[in-house]
Amino acid sequence: MNWIIEQDNEDKKIQEEIIKQGVLPKHIAVIMDGNGRWAIERGLSRTEGHQEGIESVRDIVKASSQLGIKYLTLYAFSLENWKRPIAEVGILMKLLEHYLRQELDELHKNNVRLLTIGKSSSLPKVIQKLLHESFETTKDNDGLTLTLALSYSGRWDIVRAVQMIALDVRRGRVSPEDITEELFSTYLQTEKMPYPDLLIRTSGEMRLSNFLLWEMAYGEIYITDKFWPEFRRNDLYDSILNYMHRERRYGRTSAQIASQGEVNQNDSYIQRVINAFKSK
Ligand code: FPP
């Protein structure tokens, strides 16, 4: 199904209104929390909560693509989630397998590129194979980049990056004084995507839960009390509108932002300013 053709007029109008309000976030990341609580409150099983959570995934992916968001990163399974009861881990893996089998075609037809971040070697072989097929099939798509964080943890990725830099130093490819924030970020699995502009977390919890720790240094956080299975496109629109009306200062003052617009975040600029003060 072509998502642009199937989109109803009312939704199109809402999206047009949103676009008029300001600059869309280029990258939205989501901590999809509350599947279990949503189910328990309704006397359902946790599995049913996860199943309904997949319906939210479908709607949010589609709405993001229709709206023209370039990057959507979903925290689908953390490294810590392996500690859940084995039966629940098995169900989540089955649901993931089913999702990949069922959605690949539709994602591809709608110009979505699928990627993952995380320790994929710890995933079941069948999922690794499906992921590999999905990357191959969708690698040239230039619409939405949908990244599933699977067996992922922010600290794990940072430690992995440090290990790789250390190896490059040992091999003589990098010298320690060349290690800057920019260089460091190229060793992370998120290397090819911009940092998230907006992180949405459902179910009212106020923490990052080891998600995109480095990348979220200046990302805006939006927390809603809704559980993930009830979070649908209109909630996404609310979060985007809320984001659009925030001022992102990256450590500067409001007056500077108003007069300069573009913000230079890199550390060579900061170092120049520090040096200027040192010599005074
Ligand atoms: C949090 O709910 C959700 C997860 C641990 C996994 C998210 C998974 C899905 C939405 C389904 C699979 C995803 C894809 C992309 C196919 P929770 O179980 O922690 O809820 P609780 O905190 O209320 O117990």
Image: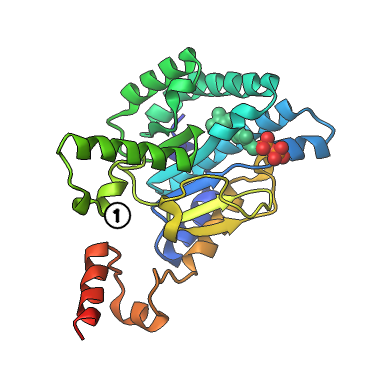
Q: In which image quadrant can residue 41 be found?
A: top right
User: Which colouring convention does the figure follow?
Assistant: rainbow
| Above or below, 270 relative to 74 | below
Which quadrant, please, contains the C terminus?
Answer: bottom left
Instruction: From the viewer's perspective, tell me whether residue 237 is left or right of residue 119.
Output: right
Give the residue drawn at x 37%, y 20%.
Answer: 132
Residue 58 seen by the camera = no
Answer yes or no: is residue 12 visible: yes
The residue lying at 31 percent from left, 82 percent from top is 259
User: How far across and down, in percent of the image, does residue 244 sit?
Assistant: 47, 65
Q: How many callouts does the rendering have?
A: 1
**243 or 169: nearer the eye?**
169
Q: Is residue 97 above or below residue 163?
A: above
- Looking at this rendering, what residue extends furthest in the top direction? 126
- Quadrant holding ligand 1? top right
Rendering quarter of residue 277 = bottom left
> Which residue corresponds to mark 1?
181
> Along the line of sight, which residue is nearer the eye, 126 or 22?
126
> What's the amino acid at mark 1?
Glu
**Position in image of residue 236 (x %, y %):** 56, 51
**Which residue is the extreme one toward the right?**
43
Drawn side of residue 180 relative to residue 212, left or right = left
Tell which of 181 and 145 is nearer to you.
Answer: 181
